[in-house]
Image (tube, rainbow, N blue to C red):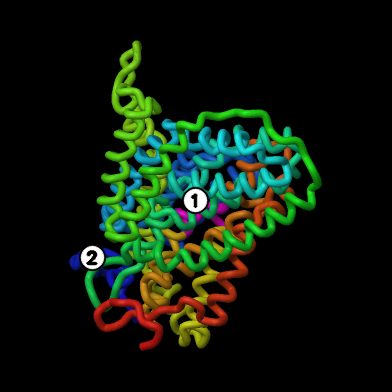
Amino acid sequence: MTSPATIAPDADADTARAPLDFRGGWGAALIPLGVFLAVSVWFFAVQQTFDFLALTAGALVGLLAGALFARSPERYWGAVFRGVGSTSSSTIIAILAIVGMYAQLIKDTGLADGMVWLATSLGVSGAVFLPFTFVSTCLVALSTGSSIGTMFTIFPVLYTAGVALGTPEALLAGAIVSGAIFGDNLAPISDTTIISSTSQRFRHRAGVADISGVVRSRSRYALTAAGVSLVVFVVAGIASGPATAPSPAGDPTGLLMLLPVIVMLVVAVALRSLFTAITIGLALGVITGLLTGLLPADGILGADAEGHATGFLVAGLAAILPTIALVFAVFGIMGVLIESGIIERLTTVLVGSRLASTPRGAEAIIAVGTSVVTVAYGGVNSASMATFGPIVDELGARVGLHPYRRANVMDCFAMGVACVVPLLSAFVFIGAALTDLDPVAVFVGSVYPLVLTAVMIVAVVTGWGRRFEAADGSPVRAL
């Protein structure tokens, strides 16, 4: 049986201690998670509201409630703080803070407006506008690493224009949701990519899965699903019939910001250093913005007449803080689950099953488990992977799966059907809220996550892309 300290991705050596003791038995350790899930369901399914701060509040209330059942409050809160202060948590938070500033720079300098100008200048008709919207949203989401931010940026611009052109509304909304999820799935600066990577440890060398390596190996699945989705949107656009060409709109200058985006992506994959890539992307982005007039000097860091700090550095950090707060809270819950022995119990049951004795079986368990947790979290896949990641790490490592493969199976199923279930999906609710559509209509039009799930089922069944960890930590086809 594996100890809780071993399961924890980065537990300190001195945390190997007796499990936390609760009044009412070990099941009381699930109270923080249960309260968090209840709050998630309440906001998404009942209130149809998406707010990371509300989820964070629910998680914190759950932690407070769980403390009432702990026989030793000091040990309980010690477990919470060790979860919050873990290396995985600290790494994710540092990356998110930097990524938030970079994403804000790309938004403020008008890349989305450049996409609109490109479409309208080319005279793209309503039939072609559907696949164009999907591709444009993919590029924006890949550039910013934020699916939710991309949706709030693109819907008011491209959805409004597409409806005016006669593009089918459900498919148009689905194209935006699909493009946003694709970017979240593949972008090296996405919170989900960061979490899925850093939660998977190497067993034959120190460290966790590097983000660039994960992105490189994940591209085969994401690009395949994106290609199939694009074909679907092209066919659907043609089938929708002729439509009028749009009138010119947008600003072509924003397209120049593709330069720092492309450089950032190339550096991230080539050097396998996200911090270096973001640093270069930020520097080149600022220079490009200043030279083209897209970014005024006070747009970097300034102050308004009322003495409030302004600029993309401040705005980007402010925008990402709710996500950082949620990461803090979720890792606090994870600290309780690990040191109470819950993760150990669940992992032991899963690892001990006959299905988990083979690589294909282990991947099937990862796929189903990730999907169930993601649905329970209302499609908030970053939180679901932070919760289920330690189990995936242990389960996949037992059969020798490489950290890249474990991260990819978990992330792609979290980005699949599980994140767009109509009655429990933040993505679907946001799409419905920004349009006049029913959530079911948005779900039907969300082609990419549906295709991605099918692609990953094929990958698990056939072993496509499956890699194992060699003695030096490198990915190999067979041990």
Q: Residue at x 42, y 32 (%)?
A: 109
Amino acid at circle 1: Phe
Q: Residue furthest left?
A: 14
Which quarter of the rendering shows the N terminus? bottom left
Which residue was labeled with disc 2?
Answer: 15
- Camera-side residue of 434 and 384: 434
Instruction: Look at the numbered disc 1 and give the secondary structure of its residue.
Output: helix
Place of residue 186 in the rendered image (x, y in percent of width and height, measured from the top left): 46, 57
Please give left or right for residue 114 compared with residue 18 in the image: right
Q: Residue at x 35, y 31 (%)?
A: 289
Q: Is residue 378 magenta?
A: yes
**Number of callouts in the render?**
2
Which residue was labeled with disc 1?
Answer: 36
Instruction: Look at the numbered disc 2 and give the secondary structure of its residue.
Output: helix
The residue segment tinted magenta is 375-384
Place of residue 421 in the rendered image (x, y in percent of width and height, measured from the top left): 65, 55
Quarter of the image holding residue 479?
A: bottom left
Q: Main secondary structure of the magenta part?
A: helix
- Camera-side residue of 28 and 118: 118
Q: Residue at x 42, y 71 (%)?
A: 406
- Residue 374 appears anywhere in the view: yes
Please give left or right for residue 321 compared with residue 456 in the image: left
Please give left or right for residue 79 compared with residue 237 in the image: left
